[in-house]
Amino acid sequence: MENILDEIAKKRIVPVVVLRNIADAKPLAQALCDGGLPCAEITFRTETAVDAIKIMSEEFPDMLVGAGTVLTPAQADQAMKAGARFIVSPGLNPTMVKHCIKKKYPVIPGVNNPSDIEAALSLGLTFVKFFPAEASGGLEMIKALSAPYPQMRFMPTGGITPENLHTYLANDKVTACGGTWMVRDELLKLQNFEEVKRLTEEALRTVRS
């Protein structure tokens, strides 16, 4: 698990993808890779998720492909069987998290309050998704939560934009950010993968600035 979390930390940005058309899986992965960010969290919000993970992980073996919005142990098993390398959930469901830990799946559950963090710590986790980030108080909330729980590291997701990305990543408790702006719905509907690539390159310049 630590190796995967180290890889996420190096990427600094995890594109969060809601893929509706399976034909978009390969060109989207290509655009992200060409933009310098071979990474994607494919959410289980559509029926294409499992097939998209399989296509991306097989066609782009060096790409860090994960599964998001995973709510059940069965979905976690489906995702990992398809080639996902990590599991992300919007909340902390102890049953699902314990299942992932038992099967040695890298898992990043969502939290946004002290009780969630204590539940994560009790399960041996020190890296969590902070969701929904902006609606839950944003960076100020992360700073507040970090005071009593200094060992915890966060991946804020939800409301992350090119405008606030650098501010989040400048905080030493933020390992990476999850974002949708470079893979947003309208770009995928238009199959505008050149714009996906451009926005990805722009995001990486922000990370490195």
Image (tube, grey):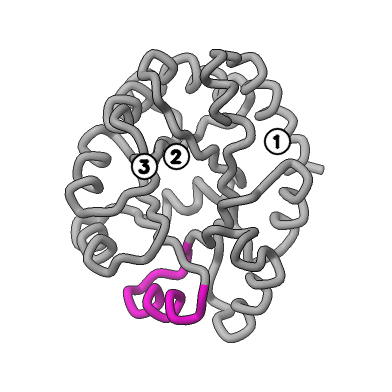
Cα distance between the residues tagged 3 and 1: 22 Å
Q: Which of the labelled discs sits on residue 153, or is there none?
A: none
Where on the picture, by quarter, is residue 134?
bottom right
How packed mark 2 is, by other alpha carbons closer than 10 Å (few <14, some 14-19, many 20 or more), is: many
Q: Amino acid at mark 2?
A: Glu
Q: Is residue 39 left or right of residue 65?
A: right
* Among numbered discs 3 and 2, the one appearing first in the sequence: 2
Q: Quadrant of the C terminus?
A: top right
Cα distance between the residues tagged 2 and 1: 17 Å
Where on the picture, by quarter, is residue 192?
top right
Q: Amino acid at mark 3?
A: Ala
Tag 3–tag 1 contact (CB < 8 Å): no
Residue 69 x, y percent position in the rendering: 37, 48
Tag 3–tag 2 contact (CB < 8 Å): yes
Q: Is residue 10 left or right of residue 39?
A: right
**Range covered by the magenta-colored residues:** 113-128
Q: Is residue 54 left or right of residue 26?
A: left
What residue sits 51% from the left and 47% below the top? 8
What residue sits 74% from the left and 31% below the top? 202
From the image, tell me which residue sits under label 3: 67
From the image, tell me which residue sits under label 2: 41
* Among numbered discs 2 and 1, the one appearing first in the sequence: 2
Query: From the viewer's perspective, is the residue at label 3 or at label 1 nearer?
Result: 3
How packed mark 3 is, by other alpha carbons closer than 10 Å (few <14, some 14-19, many 20 or more), is: many
